[in-house]
Amino acid sequence: MISKAHIIKRFVSYVTVDTESDPESQTTPSTEKQWDLANQLTEELKRIGMQDVSIDKNAYIMATLPSNVDHEVPTIGFISHFDTSPDFTGKNVKPQIIENYNGKDIVLNEAENIILSPDYFEDLLQYKGQTIITTDGTTLLGADDKAGICEIISAMEYLINHPEIKHGKIRVGFTPDEEIGRGAHKFDVEKFGAEWAYTMDGSQIGELEYENFNAAGAVVKIKGKIVHPGYAKGKMINSMYIATEFINSLPRMETPEHTTGYQGFFHLHNMEGDVEETTLKYIIRDHDSGHFEARKEMMQKLTNELNSQYGSEVISIEISDQYFNMREKIEPVMHIVDIAEKAMKALDIEPLIKAIRGGTDGSQLSYMGLPCPNIFAGGHNFHGRYEYVPVESIIKATEVICKIAELTAEEAQNE
């Protein structure tokens, strides 16, 4: 039986370390403070009895749990990231433990009247009677993805302490900078040495994902001409007006707030400008590769049309691919998804197989030769003050890891 108190203590020890990443930094990890938790995790892996524990110059951590069976078993891996999102502060996280949740509003911060309410966040009602960890309303929590790290280390510790559970060789890996899209960039797949792996980076209990967005970023720059407004007729070009025309020419309902499921979108996430120059920063997302290419072409075509109207060098666009849908790499090895689904069902967890409306380290790793579906870590409302995680979901995810290891060894023996 996995101890709830032990899980809470471990998880809290992680989230109270600030590991916010920085997209403007060019170093790896992108922030020096990520080393604080990286070094802590390295020592903890050694302490619980893991073998071949290593941390490289970029703070990528790997470790091994040796096989305890005589027959050949594929080496599998479990991966999580220890950075937190720069979307909201992760400094001075003060977790609150809500035992036996009663299904009513949770006051996160009385002074600032910050309420976590099931009237708005209906998923809360799934966890009535459970123990929920929340923020104090002034920071994010960091369950994305410190819950995943807690689950992996707790599972390894449990397997070490319970050798009656038979398993093959297991590799674990923890990465920096996933939240800024770089978590897999310097991951050494060859050194990791697994045939496949699972990222523990999903949300609610039961999630099992092997599809994600194709993703690109676009930077649009519009150049204007500033002239004294009193004498500007026929001379001034206001870049902000042209930028507005660009924005309004894209499909208004194909934005994150109007889409769900497999629907893609254009997301304007930053805009800076004056008369002389305006810069728009977009992310482009779609699960379908054809639609993804069409979205990029639409933005390029719009740029060309506005240039023909205002002048050939008024607008420039730079589009950069970021990651791709891992479905293409997972479908040829669907048995790895089947094992995870079977593990959940064995633990009375209903698998929720759906597409990720985002990306994980696993999407990039799959294209690097390490097929890597994504499994729930248990948290909700990531990247903001309303983030929370049920402790029971962390425990269930820990059990899923153990069961996957056990089933992989059983299936190898039966082949």
Image (spheres, rainbow, N blue to C red):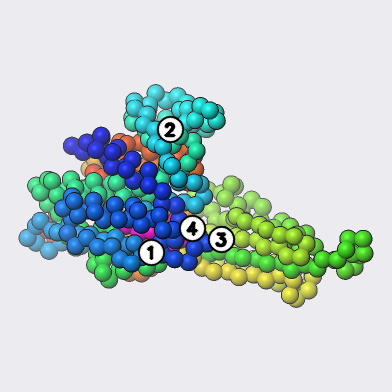
Q: Give the labeled residue for mark 3.
A: 284
Question: Which residue is rendered at x = 26% and y = 45% of the image?
Answer: 398
Is residue 140 left or right of 70 when viewed as pictured?
A: right
Mark positioned earlier in the residue sequence (2 or 1) = 2
- How would you rate the neighbour count of disc 4 (Cα within 10 Å): few for under 14, some for 14-19, many for 20 or more? some
Q: Residue 124's mark?
A: 2
State the SS at label 3: strand
- Residue bounds of the magenta highlight: 174-184
- Residue 319: x and y, percent? 58, 69
How far apart, in angstroms, are the residues tagged by discs 3 and 2?
A: 31 Å
Q: Quadrant of residue 311?
A: bottom right
Is residue 269 left or right of 222 when viewed as pictured?
A: left
Question: Which residue is rendered at x = 7% and y = 60% of the image?
Answer: 70
- Residue 238: x and y, percent? 80, 62
Residue 179: say if magenta.
yes
Q: Is residue 204 visible?
A: no
State the SS at label 4: loop
Query: CB of mark 3 within 8 Å of CB of mark 4?
Result: no
